[in-house]
């Protein structure tokens, strides 16, 4: 196979991966996305495999993380310093650098897979799904991790398949989807080696098809039974989507925004809400802990209506210098502050600048980005006799963090976010579907309040009970349940993903010895 053909195949995989996710893609493409790259890896050196994987990764992540340029351009403070044209260049360069970094993981996948192909031949493709999961696991943890658009997330809306996450987590779904691509690639390579089509070439496809059908049938039965929706304690949740622009978060507009959110809260209470959730940074520029008047108004409403209110607010700890946190506060139905959760996973380029001492040329961005400190505890918040958890913004894409909440006793998952950063890109839709996967993994209802959308309620099977569109003022009031039953994933965590990593290391070690 020519180098040009290999590059085209790797590029096709990158495009198919990017188009497996919303809002421009379709889940069906995820099932074949890796096949072109795997075929391309049938020949060539390890260095070429690295470049092929990097090509796939760059296209994959450029197509799903392109919105980072807009975030930095709009909120990074470059414009005043460098002018519009140069500001765009700097933001695009930083976005490209981050894309190049995350593209290293598909590149590593390609190198390991090529090494195994050199040792074991086309049958090595049976291990490709395990290798892919191992690299996804690494991407989720190294350098604080960035597990955005894992392959398994492409199937969040395909509910029978997505139920596998209740056993293996999203990584198991990734493996199943990758297996189908690997089986197509194996069949193509076998036919190429033998020069003609044989019935035996169908074996990998038949095995993959049988596994997919088996999971789909089991998943359909699980969703159809709806067992978790008939247990636990029912509650009614109200979600406030204020659609507040960044430009309105000023001292001059603060009171009007606060009054708007309070009015929407009263509407939710009138519709029977027992827990009202405001989005991330809902009080900005106020701080709940530093403004007794604002806190007093909310506490009075909660006490009078006998409801709990969960809201996002910056929090300052009076150290020298002061320590700033992105926090969530729970106001109890007795009108008291029931608890505070401090965000543990901060957004790179939004809440802190990675390696800011090294990236000296992004000084304006360092000054513009809030310098938050990360929390250290997976704190639960009391709602009556029950305990709930909240993930702030993109924390919800970390499976193990949400699992920590559930293992500690969370009976309802909530997540608050301000996706106005993303604009009208595909990011808000990707973010919502990744949050929905947590509901399936943990067997919990999930309530999501987003300032500009998407807000919604998801049941323990990933079914969306209610959702909003982006950039509209909306109030969602719907039913959820406090649940205590734990899924297999909640009990075992990412054991499947770690097993994939261990098997990958063992196979790679064996392949290296033989190749030498």
Image: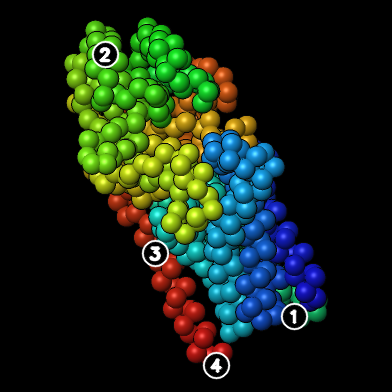
Residue 242 coordinates in the image, percent (x, y): 48, 19
In-image side of 425 versus 233 (left or right): right
Graded by Cα atoms within 10 Å as few (under 14), some (14 to 19) or many (20 or more), the crowding at tag 1 reads few
Quadrant of residue 260 within the rendered picture:
top left
Residue at image location 49% in from the left, 79% down from the top: 508
CA distance for labels 4 and 1:
24 Å
At mark 2, the secondary structure is: helix
> Can you tell which of label 4 and label 1 is closer to the viewer?
4
Which residue matches tag 2? 293
At mark 1, the secondary structure is: helix
Residue 261 coordinates in the image, percent (x, y): 41, 14
Which residue matches tag 3? 498
> Can you tell which of label 2 and label 4 is closer to the viewer?
2
Which residue matches tag 1? 193
In this rendered view, identify the residue nearer to me: 323 or 490.
Answer: 323
Eyeballing the image, is 445 above or below 18? above
For marks 2 and 3 on the same chain, the one whose residue lies earlier in the sequence:
2
> Can you tell which of label 1 and label 2 is closer to the viewer?
2
Which residue matches tag 4? 516
Residue 250 coordinates in the image, percent (x, y): 45, 21
């Amino acid at each position: 196979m020519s180098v040009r053909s290999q590059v085209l195949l790797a590029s096709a995989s990158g495009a198919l991966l990017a188009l497996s996710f919303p809002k421009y893609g379709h889940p069906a493409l995820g099932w074949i996305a890796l096949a072109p790259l795997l075929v391309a890896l049938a020949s060539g050196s390890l260095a070429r495999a690295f470049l092929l994987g990097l090509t796939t990764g760059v296209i994959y992540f450029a197509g799903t993380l392109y919105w980072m340029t807009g975030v930095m351009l709009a909120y990074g403070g470059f414009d005043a310093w460098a002018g519009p044209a140069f500001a765009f260049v700097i933001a695009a360069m930083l976005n490209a650098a981050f894309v190049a970094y995350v593209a290293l993981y598909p590149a590593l996948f390609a190198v390991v897979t090529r090494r195994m192909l050199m040792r074991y031949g086309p049958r090595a493709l049976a291990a490709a799904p395990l290798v892919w999961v191992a690299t996804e696991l690494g991407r989720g943890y190294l350098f604080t991790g960035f597990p955005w658009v894992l392959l398994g997330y492409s199937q969040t809306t395909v509910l029978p398949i997505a139920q596998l996450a209740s056993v293996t987590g999203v990584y198991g779904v990734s493996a199943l989807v990758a297996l189908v691509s690997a089986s197509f690639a194996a069949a193509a390579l076998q036919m190429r080696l033998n020069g003609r089509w044989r019935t035996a070439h169908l074996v990998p496809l038949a095995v993959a098809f049988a596994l997919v059908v088996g999971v789909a049938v089991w998943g359909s039965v699980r969703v159809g039974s709806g067992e978790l929706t008939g247990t636990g304690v029912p509650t009614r949740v109200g979600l406030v989507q204020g659609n507040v622009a960044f430009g309105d978060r000023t001292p001059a507009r603060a009171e009007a925004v606060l009054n708007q959110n309070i009015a929407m809260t009263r509407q939710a209470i009138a519709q029977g809400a027992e827990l009202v959730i405001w989005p991330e940074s809902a009080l900005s520029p106020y701080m709940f802990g530093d403004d007794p008047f604002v806190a007093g108004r909310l506490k009075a409403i909660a006490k009078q209506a006998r409801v709990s209110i969960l809201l996002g607010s910056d929090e300052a700890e009076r150290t020298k210098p002061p320590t700033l946190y992105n926090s969530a506060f729970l106001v109890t139905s007795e009108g008291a502050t029931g608890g505070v959760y401090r965000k543990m996973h901060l957004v790179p380029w939004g809440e802190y600048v990675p390696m800011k001492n090294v990236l000296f040329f992004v000084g304006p961005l360092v000054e513009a980005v809030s310098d938050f400190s990360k929390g250290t505890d997976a704190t639960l918040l009391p709602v009556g006799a029950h305990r709930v958890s909240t993930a702030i913004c993109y924390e919800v894409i970390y499976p193990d963090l949400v699992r920590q909440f559930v293992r500690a006793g969370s009976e309802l998952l909530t997540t608050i976010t301000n996706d106005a950063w993303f604009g009208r890109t595909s990011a808000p839709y990707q973010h919502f579907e990744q949050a929905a996967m947590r509901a399936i993994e943990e067997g919990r209802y999930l309530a999501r309040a987003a300032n500009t959308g998407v807000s919604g309620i998801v049941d323990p099977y990933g079914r969306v009970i209610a959702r909003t569109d982006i950039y509209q003022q909306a109030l969602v009031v719907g039913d959820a349940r406090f649940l205590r039953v734990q899924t297999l994933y909640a009990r075992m965590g990412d054991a499947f993903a770690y097993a994939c990593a261990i098997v990958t290391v063992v196979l790679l070690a064996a392949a290296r010895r033989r190749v030498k």
